[in-house]
Image: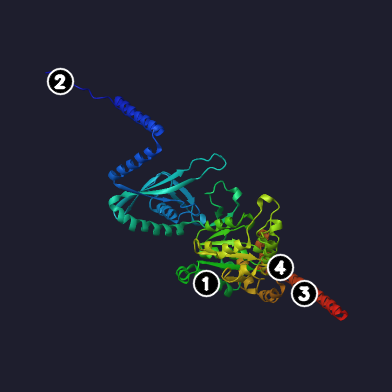
Amino acid sequence: MKMAVIAPKTMAEMWTTVGSTIASFVFVWAIICQYCPNELRRYVEKNTHRLASFFYPYIRVSIHEFTGTHLKRSEAYAAVEAYLSVNSSNSAKRLQAEMGKDSKKLVLTMDENEKVTDEFQGVKVWWVLSKIVSPQRSIAYYPEPETRFYKLTFHKQYREMISESYLEHVMKNGKEIGVKFRQRKLYTNGGTYKRSSLKQTMWSHIAFEHPATFETMAMEPEKKQEIMEDLLTFSQSKDFYARIGKAWKRGYLLYGPPGTGKSTMIAAMANLLNYDVYDLELTAVKDNTELRKLLIETTSKSIVVIEDVDCSLDLTGQRKKLEKATEDQNEQGKKETYLKEPREESNISRVTLSGLLNFIDGLWSACGGERIIVFTTNYMEKLDPALIRRGRMDKHVELSYCSFEGFKVLVKNYLKVEAHPLFESIKQLIDEAKITPADIAETLMPKSQREEEEDAEKCLSKLIRVLEDAKKEVAMKEESRAKDDSLLQDKQETEKSLN
């Protein structure tokens, strides 16, 4: 009896068979996709997924970088990113590096399509960073950006533990890590004409590295302490604001002559609270809608700054202009009184006073929370009272000419001197000279290496001469003003006697 012996296939023959099978499957699938109705194909795909999920023992959770209409970056995504940067970056083979807090240390995070393992209470889970590439538009100048998301995979028997305990653990630790290692940023808006996509942020940023603190500010100690306590109380009052039904925000109006430290005050506030700073340039904002979008894109723990608001907006007599525009709208075709218009028609800003007021304390101002809004101005009397009333600008801080207490802070910063015999002469002059902290700082600033090595007495003597000149200038201005007032009074009396 003869038996048929089947020789085993060689490796080359096996790969040839596999390749042929795959090619056949791809060909058949292409034919189905081309000629099969879309409704039938979707039905087959849906039921195929259901059948596969019945046998597939794992569950997947996706956490996208942007949600909804891409108005704001997801806090959950940021928390996961921070959590994985510390807890799982050791096992990843491909990493991204970013500069961390104070630019002293690189923070490593997962690169795209990288997979890492995490363990929680003896249960292993897997994280993958993926991205979705949107179809390119027909216009090459405006491609859609890629959107990223983290995908969490775990066995279905641990669903309850993962959803209730592990994700809460990731969110809590991720937020703490994010605060610890984040690099604070200084943002600015550049106008919509610079944006390549609706989904891209309207803000650009650099690292915020301003060294100003309240300790180095030329201001009376009592006033500094009052402002610091107000800021710290605000940052710790989340529950209080929720209880009274008020948005968690606070407005500051900084006013005073140029050179009195308004911008330095903002930097000191940011450094005290560890907040980001958003420097809003109103002349680059197209309209009220864009202004609202800018507000939505700001994060919590931030200071939104509009410097020299009296120059950015034409707010003087705004209400009278609005009434006049209403009377002439049929003739001129205008419905609102707009802000100052740039010369080029394409760059006209249509932000209104009403839009700015809603920006400060309207419904949208509650988005995000823990936000401080700061206005600075050299001439507070030019601003509309509705703009600076309590509730919008809650705290008014006057930054005036340098006092003797402020001088002592500056001389300690620049010359490392806390007491000197010439202080008494300076004390008598400084109140009458009406000189700003910026002027005093410029006088104390060494102009060369030789001047830096000079002793404090020479620098203070130079300052005394500057103060004496400033005092004479103030006296001359007051004398000239007195003469003008006298002439005006004589003229009024003469006109009165003639009448």
Report, in whole angstroms, how far the alpha carbon at label 1 lies from the one at label 3: 38 Å
**In front here: 280 or 425?**
280
**Which numbered disc covers residue 462?**
4
Q: Quadrant of residue 338?
A: bottom right
Report, in whole angstroms, how far the alpha carbon at label 4 lies from the one at label 1: 37 Å
Identity, as a three-letter code, of the amino acid under mark 1? Glu
Q: Is residue 81 left or right of residue 153?
A: right
Circle nearer the N terminus (1, 3): 1
Q: Give the vertical position of 357 relative to 132 (above or below).
A: below
Circle nearer the N terminus (4, 1): 1
Identity, as a three-letter code, of the amino acid under mark 4? Lys
- Mark closer to the observer (3, 4): 3
Would you say the residues marked 4 and 2 are in contact, meaning their CB atoms lie under 8 Å apart? Answer: no
Local SS, label 3: helix
**In front here: 210 or 469?**
210
- Mark closer to the observer (1, 2): 2
Question: What residue sits right under mark 2 in the picture?
Answer: 3
Question: What residue sits right under mark 3 in the picture?
Answer: 478
Question: Where residue 227 appears, x then y in whole percent?
Answer: 56, 71
Q: Give the vertical position of 52 relative to 495 (above or below).
A: above
